[in-house]
Amino acid sequence: MSKVQNILIEASSNARREKFKSYKNIGFNDVWSGFSYLDDNSDAFINSKGINFEDYVGCKTLTGNELFYYPELAEKICEIKEYPTLKRSYAVDCEIRGMDFIEYFCKFVRESFNNFEADLITASSIADNLIDLYGNKQQTPIINCMTTEPDGRNIVLTINGVKWQVNNSRYNKFKMTEHIDLYRLLEFSRTEFTRIEVEKIIPETPFIAIRIAKNWALKGRVYWYSLATRKVVSKMEMGRWGKPR
């Protein structure tokens, strides 16, 4: 019967005993590395600077498409910097390591979330109070005037004394409470129509002319709409505007 040979396993003299991402050395960089493909300015929960929280403010998420019917509410709610979403970022101490970091980070996330929730409750209370006060004061949208921004790219409509950007891009610089999206307002398909633009208005009425075409190479056609009904209107209907019935 053969004997089992005893083998002494020796570590190489130059072998290092430090494990890759060892729990002994774990830090914040190890936690956020799974998000590292995102930009540092990303809204992801974790980025290289810390953690982010974001949530909706108030009981209703109102956009310019709803707010221009409520000019008093629009002016008040646009003063809330956090509306319609509250965002908060919290910087993490990247110097802490090992199990001390695990304990610190768990506590840090909880405390940050509690602070965020407190801010969210405050902002939501302000927004909800405004909606209660002014949310029943709907007005017929009267277009006072139409102007163009200095760069010539965006139309500005003044409706019942409040200015609104008309921007149909899915990606724009304006908050959702600051602009009117004609695609959503008038229920146009983005895949079917590329060219949707304001042609002209009739001042002190709800009537607006919209040029519609499948793409920018085509001239398309102009239709008159009423912002009061969001429907196409005839010349006869426009002629009756303001006349006693």
Image: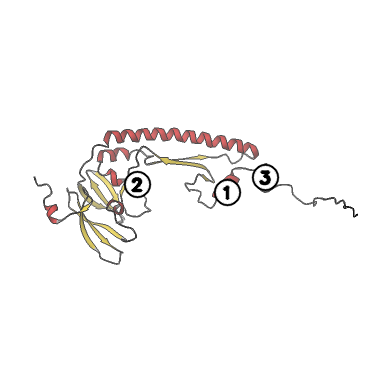
Of the two numbered discs 2 and 3 on the same chain, state the one appearing first in sequence: 3
Mark 1 secondary-structure assignment: helix
Looking at the figure, which quarter contains the N terminus? bottom right
Q: Residues within 10 Å of mark 3 (few under 14, many from 20)?
A: few
Identify which amino acid the numbered label 1 is placed on. Ser
User: Which residue occupies the foreground of this view, 129 or 162?
Assistant: 129
The image quadrant that residue 136 belongs to is top left
Distance (Cα) linking label 1 and label 2: 32 Å
Residue neighbourhood size for the residue with mark 2, other residues' Cα within 10 Å, grouped as few (<14), some (14–19), many (≥20): some
Residue drawn 51% across and 42% down?
51
Say which label, 1 or 2, has the lower sequence index. Answer: 1
Which quarter of the picture shows residue 117?
top left
Q: CA distance from mark 3 to mark 1?
A: 14 Å
Amino acid carrying mark 2 in the image:
Met
10 Å crowding of disc 1: few (<14), some (14-19), many (20+): few
Mark 1 sits on what residue?
33
Q: Earlier in the sequence, mark 3 or mark 1?
A: 3
As drawn, the residue found furthest toward the right would be 1
Residue on which the image places disc 3: 22
**Residue at image location 12% in from the left, 55% down from the top:** 236
Residue 231 % position (x, y): 22, 52
Q: Amino acid at mark 3?
A: Ser
